[in-house]
Amino acid sequence: MGMNIAVIAGGTSTERDVSLSSGKLICASLRRNGHNANMIDVFLGSDKYDNVQDFFNDKNDLEALASELGKMSPKIKEIETERKEKSEGFFGPMVLDVCKAADIVYIGLHGSNGEDGKIQGTFDLLGIKYTGTGYISSAISMDKELTKKVLVSEGIPMPKGVALKKGHKLEYVPFPCVVKPCCGGSSVGVSIVNSEEEFKSAVEEAFTYEDNILVEEYVKGREFSVAVLDGEALPVIEIEPLEGFYDYKNKYNGATKETCPANLPADVAQKMQRWAVKACQAVGIETCGRVDMLLNEDEDIFCLEINTLPGMTETSLIPQEAAAVGMSYDQLTQKIVEISMNKYNK
């Protein structure tokens, strides 16, 4: 029996456009799975429908909708400022009405105001069912400093690092090191630095995104990611950027070679899967998450971060890992809906 599903995408984060790409594909997949699904921009909302049922029944062109919403991206900051001046909230017109009427909301957002637990907490209070993990695990995973505090205390290996607040200085910086915003996603604002001069400009750049940043030792090694779906690890995927590292540009323009299952000794792959499951358990992730890792030349594993709303575009990692165990994209979206629904039936 098909359900009424609202896919929320877009929003205000630096990953807005990727979210629109994920959202339209998720929505199309849910329709193929027999659901009445439609996509709405969580921030811009919609004034197209007279009532919520029309929203769910509309078999609109999702490609056109995503493209139309994408054209609004340059104006988002301006609209945000206007809303703040008028003391208006984050959710766009009709968004909460649609979400309340849905059997479940599929969260297709990435980055802040989506992946950080705020929307999950709001939905919990309003009695709205949604896909993915809850507000606490989202908040911890989004903040790299908090993630480190939780994972390291659980004995999970991570690169050494310190948090730096705007206005504070570090006495000693080991080079090479990595500078990154604490809460940004998609590697936006991340730099690998080798000198005092590079460090200064990297810190300045990271602080343009937010007031808390992380400075970590640079671990030279191969990059991997492991998705955890319903408490089980999927096969390890290796990410090899054709140049530089796995940054925003390489993530979304195909400038990487991805191998799944990764070419690793079985015991190393299993160890990575165990760490991924343990990391997700440590922060309390339900439904699914994806843990990014590094492997150095001595085969030491370092967990880097946890993504609680991993990308669902054609080039995204979770669909590729699911495919390696024979699970199609449509089966994956259906599985995420089912295990998310199970949270509410306990």
Image: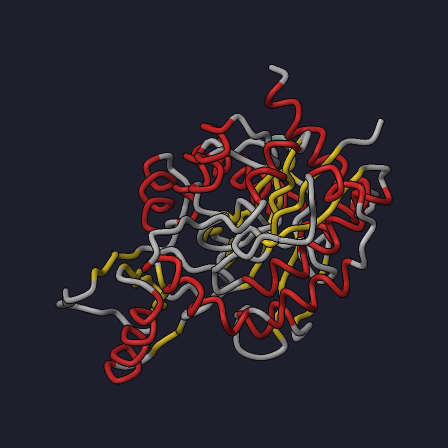
Residue 222 screen position, x and y as percent: 55, 63
- The spot of residue 207 in percent (x, y) is 29, 69
Q: Residue at x 35, y 77 (%)?
A: 193
Rendered location of residue 239, percent (x, y): 62, 63
Q: Quadrant of the C terminus?
A: top right
Q: Quadrant of residue 339?
A: top right
Q: Is residue 101 above or below residue 204?
A: above
Say which residue appears at 34% left-offset and 56% top-offset: 86
Q: Residue at x 43, y 68 (%)?
A: 77
Residue farthest toward the bottom in the current orientation of the protein: 197
Vertical placement of residue 330 versus 198, above or below: above
Relative to 198, is 338 on the left or the right? Answer: right
Looking at the image, which residue sits at the far top?
Answer: 346
Q: Quadrant of the N terminus?
A: top right
Q: Colour scheme used in the picture?
A: secondary structure
Is there any visible trace of residue 332 in the rendered image? no
Question: Can see residue 52?
Answer: yes
**Residue displayed at 58% across by 52% down:** 45
Horizontal and vertical percent for residue 20? 64, 60
Please state which of residues 84 and 265 is positioned toward the viewer in this rendering: 84
Q: Nearer the viewer, residue 195 or 323?
A: 323
Instruction: Give the farthest residue toward the front.
Output: 50
Q: Count the labels in the image.
A: 0
- Nearer to us in this view, 29 or 64: 64
In the rendered view, tell whether residue 22 sits above or below residue 232.
Answer: below
